[in-house]
Structure formats: C-alpha cells, structure tokens
Amino acid sequence: MKKTRVDQKFAELKKKEKKGFIAYLSAGDPNLEDTVDIVLRLEDAGVDVVELGLPFSDPLADGHVNQEAAARALEAGSTFDGVMECVEKIRKRSEIPMIFYAYMNPLLARGFEASMTTSAQAGIDGFLLLDLPFEEAGPYRQALKQNNLNAIQLVTPTTPDARIEKIVKRASGFVYCVSREGVTGVQDKLAEGAGALVERIKEKTNYPVALGFGIGTPEQARDAAQLSDAVVVGSAIVQKFHNSPHTPQGRADAAAFVAEMVAAVKGI
C-alpha cells in the first residue's frame, strides 16, 4: 500500500515528537454543506485527523449525543452519495487526513467493494468499521487494501491479550484504543486502566495508538495524550457545534473550544 494522508500525518507527528488530535463529527449534521465548513474550521483549529461518521439509523456503539447527530443528519437528507460529494468538496480545499467511522449495513447494502472504491475516489483515507469482527474481516480487509484505505482497528478494555495481538496485525494507519467499556459520550474523568490498556497494545504493534471514548475537556485530553500517541474527541465536539449558533461567529466559538483541547494535547 502507498502511504495514506493518515500514515503521512502520524510520521510527521512522530518526527516532531508531537501527539495527534483526532476529531469526530457526524457527516451531515446539521447538513452536508455545513459539514464542509466545520471540517475546514477543525483543520484551522489544529486538528490532525477528522473522523467522519457515516450517518446510520442504528449506531449501536454510540451514546445519545452521537446517536442524535446521526439522526439529525438523516433527517436533513444525508445520503451515502451526498456524503461522498461533501468529501469531494472538502478535498478541493484541504488535504487533511479523513477516515470514515462506519457501520457495515449501509456499506453492504450498496456493495462493500463499490463503497470502498467510491470512498477512496472521493478522498477518504481509511475506515473504522465498528461492527466488523476481525474473524470475519478477511475479504473486507482485502477491499480496503485494494483501494489503499487504512483499516483502523478497535481494541477495548475487555479484549484479551491474545486477541489484541491478532487484531493489531490486521491494522493499518493507527489502532483505536477504547478507553472504557460502553458507548461513546463525555465522562467526568478518564477511565482507570486506560494507560495500562495502551501499554498492552503498544507491546504488540508499532502503529500509533489513539485513545478515545469519554474525553471532553482540555484537562482530560492532556491526560489522555500523556498515555497515548493521539487523542480522539467526539461527543464533546459534536455537542459544542450543535449547541452553538449556526452562524459564522457560533462556528468560530465552537472551533475555539476545539483549539483549546488541541493546545492541551500539543503542549505535552
């Protein structure tokens, strides 16, 4: 595989001895046109990688904030093709690394290989497939590889060491470490045991390890960055942009909130 924008970004961060910041948002919330604006604002705020949620009616790995964001996106008329057009518009103005956070059903409904090809042509760099067990991933992973797309793998606190070893062997780009059991959503503090889980993963792979789920403040982001190679923030960003006025000033205020968390991560 050729190096993706994700690979290049993490290589650059390693060279600079800096931690990465990955921001999640649901594509199409509040609509696809505004998603383009939000992604560009995230880039200006210093975000390294954008994780775009493909809107799905049953996002089982997500808490209420991201579930509601997906529902708003679908109600606003977001479709697979519309999201691809959105990505193409972003690519005309930015080379920020982007991956899709996706569930299998919509991809299978369209034809998995066709979905991968279309996504790569639009300008996506990889996929985090939430509900694809690694035991069943073989043919799907091949379609990712053929389209030069990173296969981001998830490891959770309940994953045994032997299984972690098998999962990370199938990873590319980075490994996503889920900091706690349960679904996405801001928590009061970083989960105990998150650092130990990151270390268990790092013993088995040279890929960067990104820590996510539950991180919602600059302090939590800084603490997470001390444990990992990158920090993933989702629900807090989704909620901030949703609650802020959908105006240039409102968007600027939301982006400034993200910039605070980025600064906390980069300051380590």
Image (cartoon, rainbow, N blue to C red):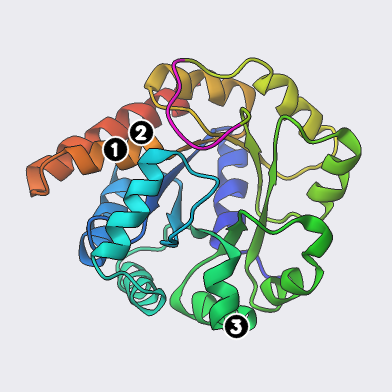
- Residue at point 23%, 42% (across, down): 241
Q: Is residue 197 left or right of residue 217?
A: right
Residue underneath mark 3? 111
The mark nearer the N terminus, 1 or 3, is 3
Residue underneath mark 1? 239
The boundaries of the magenta stretch are 182-188
Q: Is residue 44 left or right of residue 143?
A: left
Q: Secondary structure at mark 1?
A: helix
User: In the rendered image, is residue 255 in sight?
Assistant: no
Q: Residue furthest front?
A: 58
Residue 265 coordinates in the image, percent (x, y): 46, 27
Q: Secondary structure at mark 3?
A: loop
Category of crowding for the residue at label 3, using alpha-carbon neighbours closer than 10 angstroms: few (below 14), some (14–19), many (at least 20): few
Q: Are marks 1 and 2 in contact (CB under 8 Å)?
A: yes
- Residue at point 91%, 39% (across, down): 162
The amino acid type, in three-letter code, at marker 3 is: Gly
The amino acid type, in three-letter code, at marker 1 is: Gln
Q: Which mark is residue 236?
A: 2
Above or below: residue 202 compared with residue 25? above
Q: Residue furthest right?
A: 162
